[in-house]
Image (cartoon, rainbow, N blue to C red):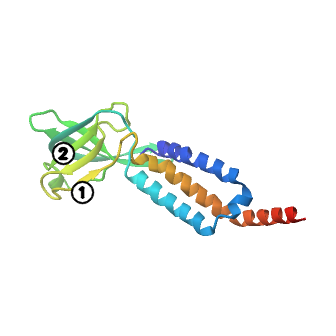
Amino acid sequence: MDFTLHMECCLLGGGPALAIFFALGAKRRAWIPPLAWWLSLILGVVIGGYAMFHSTMPSFSTRITAVGRAYDYVEREIRTGYHHNTIYGFQLVPEGGQPIHIETEIILLDAAKPAIFNGRILRVVYLADSKRILKNEAIEIEVLSGEHTGSHRSIDARPLGAWLGIPVGAAFLIFGFFGLKYMENDAIAAAADDDDTAT
């Protein structure tokens, strides 16, 4: 997934999480045990990490399935500021059809070894969307012949798919992080508030 889109997804979950965190106030947050903050932090890392590595930019575009022989594997980098993503590409030649240039974020087994990769038959599901950064972006690849036959790899591009785990993970992570960071100050503020109400 593109770095900019990833950060936007994190803000989508992180902003409301911060608003809720500070709206709770120190006295209410002081009642939350440290284990809950740690669990929130860990849950955020797990959910966000899974979503980040198993999804791509969501799309409503048509999914096209093609079966053919793969040739000419290449790697290229897309740079956005200080960040970069490696993109994998190859030519898919359906039987009796025109070659299709496929690009993907899916790492292909033994793709850099032409003796193994070239000529292997793949079933590829790709997005027919010319506005995407990756042209003919493959979201599902299955090896049908040669080494690693039966290997199946995919990333989720559904509009209501795995990418939603990124804002959810960010929300849990930020909630847990700030909970741990403010835990001591919240306890002091809550104790001082109790002393004020007692007098």
Disc 1 is placed on an element classified as loop
The amino acid marked with disc number 1 is: Leu
Q: Nearer the viewer, residue 132 or 82?
A: 132
Query: Which numbered dot is residue 109?
Result: 1
Q: Is residue 199 something that shows in the picture?
A: yes
What count of labels does the image hold? 2
Residue 178 horizontal/vertical position (percent): 64, 58
Query: Residue extending furthest top?
Result: 130
Query: Which residue is label 2 attached to?
Result: 123
- Which is more N-terminal, label 1 or label 2? 1
The answer to which quarter of the image holds residue 25 is bottom right
Residue 97's place in the image compared with 113, above or below, is: above
Determine the CA span between mark 2 and mark 1. Answer: 14 Å
Residue type of the residue flagged with mark 2: Arg
Residue 6, position as x, y percentages in the image: 48, 46
Residue at 20% of width from left, 50% of height from top?
Answer: 142
Which residue appears at 41% of the width and 56% of the height? 50
In front of the other: 81 or 98: 98
Residue 170: horizontal and vertical position, in percent? 53, 52
Can you name the residue that lies furthest to the left here? 96
Give the farthest residue toward the right: 199
